[in-house]
Image (spheres, rainbow, N blue to C red):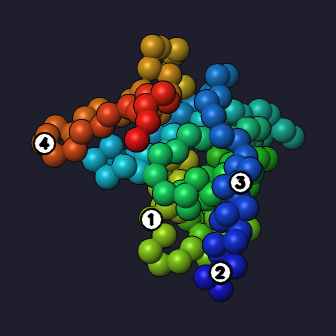
Amino acid sequence: MKEEFEDRAREALVQPKNVGEMIDADSVGTVGSPDCGDMLRMWLKFTEKDGKKVIDRASFQAFGCQTAIAVASMATELLKGKTPEEARNLKPNELSGDLGPLPPMKIHCGQLVEQALKSALDGKEAPAKSPVETLAGNLQPASNGKIKIVPLDETASD
């Protein structure tokens, strides 16, 4: 069972779906903490279908473990066509889609995706364009001085 999960997660990581900022999003939700390293931002775009507001598109950016990225990829596909109410009622284990049940030590990854979704569904409007456009641009050094975030230069070598 563990090997099956790892194989499905690996597949989702090779070609994750819906990664990246959605410029025309109707709402955005960001959760996580730079102190622990897991952060996820989810964008939602709505449309009207049969007189109901439904999710037309969802995308994400994530910093954290590979499982969080895989779950977010699965979740953004699963959300298409759901009403906000249907999406809000999805549980972390449902958001993981074809990955199946998450191992106990990875349940927090599903919860991170669930929290980002609920934050976006809470009606927060997508922020206007600013110099800080990416999730990485929002990371701030920890205030206690124990963690220092240093962007790596692509030309740097070991």
Q: Earlier in the sequence, mark 2 or mark 4?
A: 2
Q: Earlier in the sequence, mark 3 or mark 1?
A: 3
**Residue annotated with mark 2:** 3
The tally of labels here is 4
Q: CA distance from mark 2 to mark 1?
A: 19 Å
Q: Earlier in the sequence, mark 2 or mark 1?
A: 2
Q: CA distance from mark 4 to mark 1?
A: 24 Å
Q: Which residue is mark 4?
A: 144
Q: Nearer the viewer, mark 4 or mark 1?
A: 4
The image position of residue 147, as x and y in percent, is 22, 44
Displayed quadrant of residue 88:
bottom right
Looking at the image, which residue is at 61% across and 59% down?
71
Q: Residue beneath label 3, please?
A: 14
User: Hey, which residue is sitting farthest right in the picture?
Assistant: 50
Q: Residue furthest bottom?
A: 1
Instruction: Say whether disc 4 or disc 1 marks the residue closer to the N-terminus.
Output: 1
How packed is label 2: few (under 14 Cα within 10 Å), some, or many (20 or more)?
few
Residue type at the position of mark 4: Asn
